Image (tube, rainbow, N blue to C red):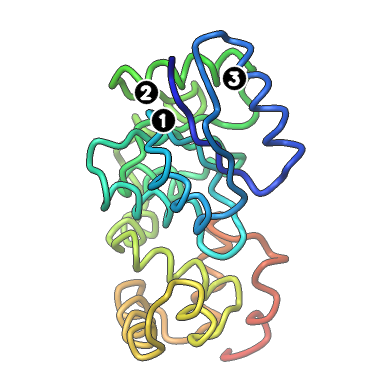
């Protein structure tokens, strides 16, 4: 039996995926979580064979959850199941330690196949994501963002959503000074000088949606 932790912020969606997975007969949902913090606590408590996580979660993202899980247990197997399959996001999820990445647009049987593959130690990518993974000629902006560490990327994402340094610090359990240092380093690495420019880059690469970053679009121009 494959024990699975399912992390998604929509209860109805989680319920549907749980029924689908357990209908396969060889998969058991040991726990569900709605955000990265409760997902991490559930991982520590249940030590599932596979953790399935969305990337868009309240507060910290699924990428931060992957980083925390893999930092605690290098043998942990994580599968991303998300509607966000932009190249930069896929790259960063893999860099953070994900063993598979499938789009929520995939057929139901793809999710079952992916869980079984990741559980036995294989990597698995849905067809659309595989095309992104196999392309190793990233444009300059994608390459620059890929140079960010997983923690730097998470701070970048939160700042691009319009969170202040203090709000980022609270979300990530860091000091405000640490976040401020990250913010300066991120701007230097991305070669941007203003918060608005940072937001525009995140929008262009599909890291955040327009509705997430509206607070910063009219400042620091």
Q: Which residue is mark 2?
A: 118
Q: Are marks 1 and 3 in contact (CB under 8 Å)?
A: no
Image quadrant containing the N terminus = top left
Q: Is residue 155 above or below residue 141?
A: below
Q: Position of residue 65 (x, y in %)?
A: 43, 53
Q: Is residue 192 above or below residue 107?
A: below
Circle 2 packing at 10 Å, graded few (<14), some (14-19), many (20+), is many
Q: Which of the two discs, 2 and 1, labels the residue nearer the N terminus?
A: 1
Between circles 2 and 1, the one closer to the viewer is: 1
Q: Position of residue 37 (x, y in %)?
A: 50, 59
Q: Residue furthest left?
A: 74
Circle 1 packing at 10 Å, graded few (<14), some (14-19), many (20+), is many
Q: What element does badge 1 sit on?
A: strand
Q: Residue at x 55, y 37 (%)?
A: 31
Q: For the residues marked 1 and 3, what is the alpha-carbon distance in whole angstroms?
A: 12 Å
Q: Which of the two discs, 1 and 3, labels the residue nearer the N terminus?
A: 3
Asked if residue 69 lies left or right of residue 7, the reply is left
Q: For the residues marked 3 and 2, what is the alpha-carbon distance in whole angstroms?
A: 14 Å
Q: Residue at x 34, y 29 (%)?
A: 134
Q: Residue at x 41, y 79 (%)?
A: 192
Q: Position of residue 7 (x, y in %)?
A: 56, 43
Q: Residue furthest front?
A: 45
Q: Which residue is mark 3?
A: 21
Task: State which quadrant residue 167 falls in.
Answer: bottom right
Q: Which residue is mark 1?
A: 50
Q: For the residues marked 2 and 1, what is the alpha-carbon distance in whole angstroms?
A: 7 Å
Q: Are marks 3 and 2 in contact (CB under 8 Å)?
A: no
Q: Are marks 2 and 1 in contact (CB under 8 Å)?
A: yes
Q: Is residue 97 above or below residue 1?
A: below
Circle 3 packing at 10 Å, graded few (<14), some (14-19), many (20+), is many
Q: Which of the two discs, 3 and 2, labels the residue nearer the N terminus?
A: 3
Q: Position of residue 55 (x, y in %)?
A: 53, 48
């Amino acid at each position: 039996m494959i024990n699975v932790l399912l992390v998604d912020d929509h209860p109805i969606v989680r319920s549907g995926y749980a029924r689908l997975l357990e209908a396969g007969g060889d998969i058991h949902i040991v726990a569900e979580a709605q955000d990265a913090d409760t997902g991490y606590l559930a991982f520590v408590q249940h030590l599932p064979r596979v953790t399935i996580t969305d990337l868009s979660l309240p507060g910290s993202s699924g990428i931060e959850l992957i980083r925390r899980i893999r930092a605690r247990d290098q043998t942990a197997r994580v599968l991303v199941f998300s509607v966000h399959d932009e190249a930069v996001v896929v790259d960063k999820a893999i860099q953070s330690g994900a063993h598979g990445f499938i789009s929520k647009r995939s057929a139901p049987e793809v999710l079952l196949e992916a869980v079984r593959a990741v559980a036995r130690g294989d990597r698995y990518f849905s067809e659309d994501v595989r095309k992104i993974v196999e392309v190793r000629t990233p444009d300059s902006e994608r390459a620059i963002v890929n140079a960010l560490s997983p923690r730097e990327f998470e701070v970048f994402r939160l700042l691009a959503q319009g969170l202040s340094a203090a709000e980022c610090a609270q979300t990530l359990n860091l000091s405000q000074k640490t976040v401020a240092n990250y913010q300066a380093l991120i701007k230097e690495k991305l070669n941007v000088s203003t918060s608005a420019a940072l937001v525009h880059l995140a929008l262009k690469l599909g890291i955040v949606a327009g509705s997430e970053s509206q607070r910063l679009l009219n400042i620091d121009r």
